[in-house]
Amino acid sequence: MNKVQRKTSSYVLAALVCWATTTFADQPSQGSQFAASQHFAPQQNADSQALMGELVEQGLPQTWLEEVLGQAKYTQSVLDAMEGAAERRLKWYEYRAIFLTQQRIEEGAEFIDAHADALARAENTYGVPAEVITAIIGVETYYGRHKGQHRVLDSLATLAFHHPTRGAFFRGELAAFLRIAYEQKVDPTELRGSYAGAMGYPQFIPTSYQAYAVDFDGDGRRDLWENPVDAIGSVANYFAEHNWQPGGDIYHQASGFEVLPIELLQELSFNQTSPPAMSVAQLAAHGVEAEEPLDDNLLVMPLALEFAGGETRYRLGEYNFYVITRYNHSHLYAMAVTELAEAIAELHEDEA
């Protein structure tokens, strides 16, 4: 290479370096982009700004929304917790042991005594037994003792803008939460709940709060955070709106295989949380039989529950069992609520 070529090459290289430096200096790195997305102030986050715009159109003040969203904090532990829900990783006997403790049963009976009037009124109004309402609150928050330590604002903002698959769902929950806080005149930065944004005694997510919460004591306010009477009425209303059948059974004991064949587990749709679709006669033909006389045409949900030592026991859920799964889409959850309700009712009757 001669001197002219070397000189020309040097100029070209210098120009390229200058262009690259200028171009990429103007573009934020992936790390800085992610850091920016962790700020939820509408001025810094396009997704947050879009949500604010929608809520302003619905009547919420822009200045209030800017102030509130600007105080939301990204919380990685919320995303981590979403991956480890107990319903996804525990077997029945492990899950049951969490909720069917003597203390929780005794405190359930005490809750019934403490709120006898409200529970009786809820049962008369909505047809849901007092022990079932009590068991829901007992499983969800230990009768209001453990309502959650996460700031709801932080949880929902993190999930709305960072959950890899359910962002749209949680965006709706964040919008509902902001509306509730504004309409109820409560400070959204002070409200705490579960990592998934569930709130109060019954752990309603915000859209459920909007749809099913009731002012059961008539004080002009639907308060699920501090008012157990409103919580009682709201749980009962939730069940009624999901077509709870007053006086109906929840489940029946059944007998079946010592070891359930995999092909039948799938063919007969065991442990699903869809409406009852298998008849008693169909299940009996496959070797799963009710331990009491039932109508052959009765539609049920076949359940296979694993106990310690590998033993499998069978139950047949009726429509009311399905209704409980509308509260939490898990057959383990519904069975824990049902057994806790049974134990509370039995103890309460013994003490009467």
Image (cartoon, rainbow, N blue to C red):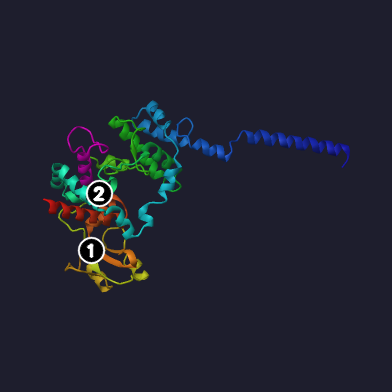
In this view, which residue lies farthest toward the left? 352
Residue 57 seen in this snapshot:
yes
In the picture shown, does residue 265 fall above or below 161? below
Residue nearest the observer in this picture, 307 or 31: 307
Earlier-in-chain disc, 2 versus 1:
2
Going by the numbered disc 2, the residue's amino acid type is: Ile
Residue nearest the observer in this picture, 172 or 347: 347
Which mark, residue 299? 1
Which mark, residue 109? none
Q: Which residues are magenta?
A: 214-240
Q: Quadrant of residue 53?
A: top left
- Give the left or right position of residue 24, taking residue 248 as reference: right
In the picture shown, does residue 106 fall above or below 274? above
Q: Position of residue 152 (x, y in %)?
A: 36, 38
Secondary structure beneath label 1: strand
Which mark, residue 136? 2
Q: Residue at x 34, y 33 (%)?
A: 190
Q: Position of residue 25 (x, y in %)?
A: 63, 34
- Give the left or right position of residue 55, taking residue 253 as reference: right
In this view, which residue lies farthest toward the top? 63
Disc 2 to disc 1, C-alpha distance: 25 Å
- Residue 92 in magenta? no
Q: Quadrant of residue 320?
A: bottom left
In the picture shown, does residue 336 fall above or below 153? below
Choose mark 2 or mark 1, whichever is in front. 2
